[in-house]
Amino acid sequence: MKKNLVVHLTSVHRSSDLRIFHRECRSLAQDNYDVLLIAPHDRNEVIEGVRIRALPKPKNRLDRMTRVAWAAYREATRQPADIYHFHDPELLGAGLLLRARGKKVIYDIHENVPKSIMNKHYLPKWLRRPVAWIVERVECFACRRFSALVPAAPSIEQRVRTLNPRVVTIHNFPIAQDMRPASNIPWSGRSPSVAYVGGIDIRRGIREMIEAMNLLPEELHAKLKLAGPFFPPRLQDEVRRIPGWKRVDALGVLELPAVMNLLSRVRAGLVLIHHPLSRFQAGQPVKMFEYMAMGLPVIASDCPQWREIIEGFGCGLLVDPAKPQAIAEAIEYVLSRPEEAESMGRRGRQAVESAFNWEAEQHKLLQLYANLLKPGNIPAHSRPEQVEDASTARDMTTFQTQHK
């Protein structure tokens, strides 16, 4: 029996992106789809059943939005796919052109794009609002024409649910079986360190993290492990001058196995996004659930959406991300109380296994694909994802009630 061919496209993300490759593409390949991922990569190859078609790596941002995006579209047109699934606003034009050819096209919306433009360091401040206004209208126009929309969080769904009859929110939860702490490293064998994994910039609290390290007692021998790229790259040279940098290890961008090894050796994970930054705070930061999956207590910004998780499951501490002293006190707390920190991490792991895991999201993804491939599709007003989300919400509520 011939497999259905599905094509995922990205000109922005790495071919090893956690959401695109590890969660969505692998899940589809395991469900007997023929999966082709068009993405910036060194060469064409097959990894874990996913065929990767290499795009040239962009020279700069403009090159990414023009030459590389066009190359992604041209490669997509060469594939007789049953479904095309793209992941970047830069590819909205490609998605619309594919729809004009009568193709089934899914737009995977990773973030609130107009709001994110308001925080782009490379745009002059006076230009950000008009650019955001234009982008929002272009995106809304396009969203009405795609076969389905896949927001990565409920806050994104709120923006687009009136634009298209088929919206399925697929949370970016970790694959529980793939992410777990190394069993051969006891808590007592971990170094007195905390980690931050992901993009590093001012609004994600890098200055306050470093300043907090300078406030910790010398006898703790505490370290901050950073794993991710600096935005902009020159930021790293700037923050090196902040007191506390001597306690920082900047590890660069790590692939998933190296990230898991790092998180198996530290004692807490940091998510210290500034107020107000609604695209993050109203959303669900991937790193928070990855820390939880790895059995780490989370030190997070105190906002209502995150408080419900951190306090509800007793898996970490909440702080004002603008106050280095508060961050330092939270780090000192988890480093000086190893038994309590380990218990927090264990509760976070239980929460991931019971509620915040990819397994439930995978079912929604596969159901969406099955519905789109049915002859004549499904009625536009049918919303099976609401049943799935309601079920997930009931499971989370039950788990919280049992573990408070």
Image (cartoon, helix red, strand yellow):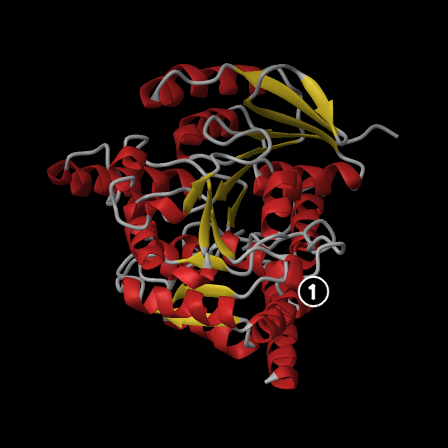
Residue at far right of view: 1
Q: Quadrant of the N terminus?
A: top right
- Asked where in the image residue 387 lies, by quadrant, the reply is bottom right
Residue matched to label 1: 353
226 sits left or right of 212 in the view = right
- Asked where in the image residue 321 lies, by quadrant, the reply is bottom left
- Asked where in the image residue 348 lies, by quadrant, the reply is bottom right
Toward the viewer: 83 or 230? 230
Residue 89 in percent (x, y) is at 40, 35
Tell me if residue 214 comes above or below residue 41 in the rendering: below
Query: What residue is rendered at 59% in x and 65% in y?
Result: 389
Query: What residue is rendered at 63% in x and 36% in y?
Result: 21
Tell me if residue 240 comes above or below residue 36 in the rendering: below
Secondary structure category for the residue under label 1? helix
Residue 181 in percent (x, y) is at 68, 55
Residue 3 in percent (x, y) is at 80, 30
Circle 1 crowding by C-alpha within 10 Å: few under 14, some 14–19, many from 20: some
Residue at far front of view: 219
Toward the viewer: 389 or 343? 343
197 sits left or right of 390 in the view = left
Q: Quadrant of the C terminus?
A: bottom right
Query: What residue is rendered at 49% in x and 32% in y?
Result: 13
Toward the viewer: 347 or 277? 347
Query: What residue is rendered at 63% in x and 62% in y?
Result: 295
- Would you say residue 318 is visible in this rendering? yes
Tell me if residue 173 comes above or below residue 11 in the rendering: below
- Would you say residue 305 is visible in this rendering? no
Toward the viewer: 47 or 83? 47
The amino acid beneath tag 1 is: Glu
Residue 14 in percent (x, y) is at 53, 30
